[in-house]
Amino acid sequence: MYKIAVIPGDGTGPEVVQEGLKVLRAAGTKFNFEYECTEYDFGGARYLRTGDILPDEALNELRHFDAIYLGAIGHPDCPPGVLEKGILLRVRFELDLYINLRPVKLYPGVECPLKNKEPEHIDFVVVRENTEDLYVGAGGVYQKGTPNEVAVQESINTRRGVERCIRYAFDLARSRNKDKKVTLCAKTNVLTYAHDLWQRVFYEVAKEYSDITADYAHVDATCMWMVKNPEWFDVIVTTNMFGDIITDLGAIIQGGMGVAAGGNINPSGVSMFEPIGGSAPKYTGQNVINPIAAIGAVQMMLAQLGEQTAATAVERAIMTTILKMKSMDAGKMGYGTDAVGSLIAEAV
């Protein structure tokens, strides 16, 4: 019996989560596993109504689930950063979800903006460190709003945090059994303190994985090669800030935010899974948003829970359904949000 916390969130989050849960039900029935969902109303509507963001007692409850399934966080009537820091970052940091896992995979039938690139060219994973770097919030502002204003944001990198992320990437490359290559994405020629730490630890850990090729690329070169030769990558490991940027580039080359799912992983604790496209408030309630990313998050969640057969079936169902759709873009799919969810559930 898996215990799953469900946070539908804001905007189109509840719509895509509903379709994800529809597919989860189909998988549970087909592959004989049981689960129990507990829903939480964290998000913009609750904040505007009560002033609550994420109560301490609720955060403590989340520690005891097997997984967290998130729709989207972001409300146009809330100040920027309030919900993101108060919910997303707080959950990541306090539950120690130190790996952000982003598969970048082009499915057959999905239009890719890159010339002459097919599914065999785009199939890699970005392992992003998820609890350090600039997102720690270290720094401050002096004389704000004046001509003399000074703003400082510090990048915090610990040996422990860097090493556990790098080890996860090497283990993942071994389990994928693809090109067996890990590429460190950093900027050692400019960020000579923090990224020197990353590079030293990377090559120290690499010595323990003789079957895995260790490679390095500056972040600007990584972006260039993701566009020109994405087939060069197998597993990319990188910092929190750079990972935040290159995973959005990855989403576009795999067909857009509508198909991009991600996991926030604690390998020895609860992990959180979500579509990465945001709340898309302008599409709320119109039954036009693409739910495939949210269903892909369910697939990742099943894999993390150890239900690999079910996870594989969900991915195959996604691929089968994509071939019936006209587009991955909201409002252009040829089906409504609910119909796409039903097609995938039936395919499972």
Image (cartoon, grey):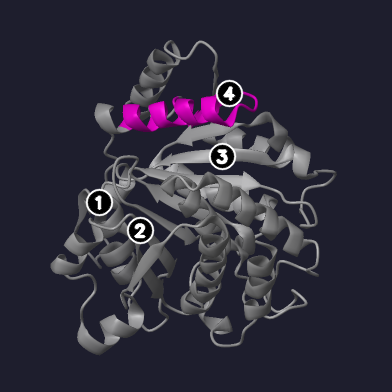
Q: Which numbered disc, 1 or 3, marks the residue that appears first in the sequence?
A: 1
Q: Residues within 10 Å of mark 1 (few under 14, many from 20)?
A: many
Q: Amino acid at mark 4?
A: Lys
Q: Secondary structure at mark 4?
A: strand
Q: Amino acid at mark 3?
A: Val
Look at the image and tell me in which quarter the N terminus lies: bottom left
Q: Which numbered disc, 2 or 3, marks the residue that appears first in the sequence?
A: 2
Q: Residue 296, how many percent across, how many down?
A: 57, 58
Numbered label attached to residue 1: 2
- Left/right of residue 221 with respect to residue 188 in the rendered view: right
The residue located at (54%, 73%) in the rendering is: 16
Q: Residues within 10 Å of mark 4 (few under 14, many from 20)?
A: many
Residue 320 location, quadrant: bottom right
The residue located at (69%, 37%) in the rendering is: 230
Q: Secondary structure at mark 2?
A: loop
Confirm whether the magenta stretch covers residue 88: no
Residue where numbered disc 4 is placed:
181
Real-space CA distance between mark 2 and mark 1, rounded to the nearest whole angstrom: 22 Å
Q: Amino acid at mark 1?
A: Leu
Q: Is residue 187 visible?
A: no
Judge whether 188 appears above or below 153 on screen. above
Residue mark closest to the camera, 2 vs 3: 2
Numbered label attached to residue 125: 3
Real-space CA distance between mark 1 and mark 4, rounded to the nearest whole angstrom: 29 Å
Q: Are marks 3 and 4 in contact (CB under 8 Å)?
A: no
Residue range (magenta): 162-188
Real-space CA distance between mark 4 and mark 2, rounded to the nearest whole angstrom: 36 Å
Look at the image and tell me in which quarter the C terminus lies: bottom right
The residue located at (57%, 66%) in the rendering is: 26
Q: Are marks 4 and 2 in contact (CB under 8 Å)?
A: no
Q: Is residue 348 visible?
A: yes
